Amino acid sequence: MNQSKKVTDGALLLAVFIVLMLIAIFVPITISVLIFLLPVPFIIYTSKYDWKTSLFMFLVAILLSLLLATLLSLPITIIAGFGGIMIGAAIYHRQTPYETWARGTLGFIGGLLFAYLFTQYFLEINWVTEIDEMINESLQMSKDIVEQFGLTQTDEEFNLIKEQLSYITDLIPAAIAIISTLLAFIAQWISYKIMNHFENRNMKFPPFRNFKLPVALVWIYFFALLFTIFDLNPDEILFIVANNVVVLAGFLIALQGFSFIFFYAHYKSWSIAIPIICVLFTLLLPLLLLYFVRIIGIIDIGFRIRDRLSKKGS
């Protein structure tokens, strides 16, 4: 009976995945939404039967995606499968939501790395060249708009901006890690909602205001920042690693800063709309406000401000 249920559940969830995957392939505009839903069948199945049983479902999904769709379906299936199985296995072993999130992030990193290498070497898509071309087109468009408004921009200023943007390709590893973090969080959150509804479970993330990161992250951020201050050769591996660490650690510290804003609003009994508005304004004006959010995060991590406020309140 149990084996029969495994097969039935696997076939049903596999069918759901294939339908979602086909829609994503043949209606590309939907990929920005479906990329968060595609791991869900793997998460649900693995959360019931663990990763060993899910591997067979994963292999069948790869085979069917290649038979029914194009070669592009392979990296999509790998990304969804790696991330989904890692999250589902963590749920199966009753790990905390944040531990599950961390494992899911590692799974999506593995899937995205495979997709990057697959498109680079098998589909012959050079992402560095593609990104450079996009940057050049955007810069040229911006230059044309500036000239249309009668404003002037020297060649030195234009070349300086171009040189700064050329470093974006060096940040691909940090971008993969950040995208994986967001993919894991949203896919896990959606899975919690679905499983709570259909299986009468009560899985959820702790309140965002309780999100905390270790003090060591601040030291990692500062040491990496020091390396970027030195006049290093941009082609050196140390320069590239330091910049990626700064971007990734800065992203996590910003999360800590947002978390403290939510905590302080709750501490002061303010409306939930206030911290939400702060987040929206930061996303709209990142160059102006994101540094302040990071400073808040650094202060909160280093001095444990919320712990002191909690003791004061009690």
Image (tube, helix red, strand yellow):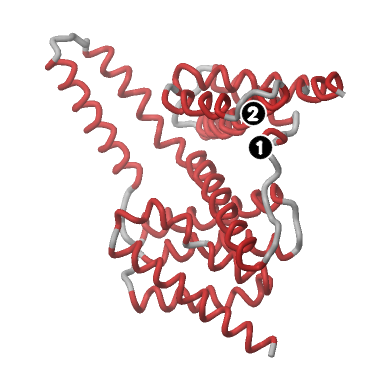
Three-letter amino acid code at the position of disc 2: Phe
Q: Are marks 1 and 2 in contact (CB under 8 Å)?
A: yes
* Residue at the spot 26% in from the left edge and 17% down from the top edge: 158
Residue annotated with mark 2: 262
Left or right: residue 163 versus residue 236 is left
* Residue at the spot 47% in from the left edge and 75% down from the top edge: 61
Bin the neighbour count of mark 1 within 10 Å (Cα to Cα): few under 14, some 14-19, many 20 and up.
some
Residue annotated with mark 1: 208
Q: CA distance from mark 1 to mark 2?
A: 7 Å
Please state the horizontal and vertical placement of residue 284, each as a whole percent of the image: 42, 26
Q: Secondary structure at mark 1?
A: helix
Three-letter amino acid code at the position of disc 1: Phe
* Residue at the spot 76% in from the left edge and 24% down from the top edge: 306
Instruction: Work out whether 151 lies above or below 134.
Output: above
* Residue at the spot 53% in from the left edge and 73% down from the top edge: 58
Instruction: Work out whether 269 lies above or below 34.
Output: above
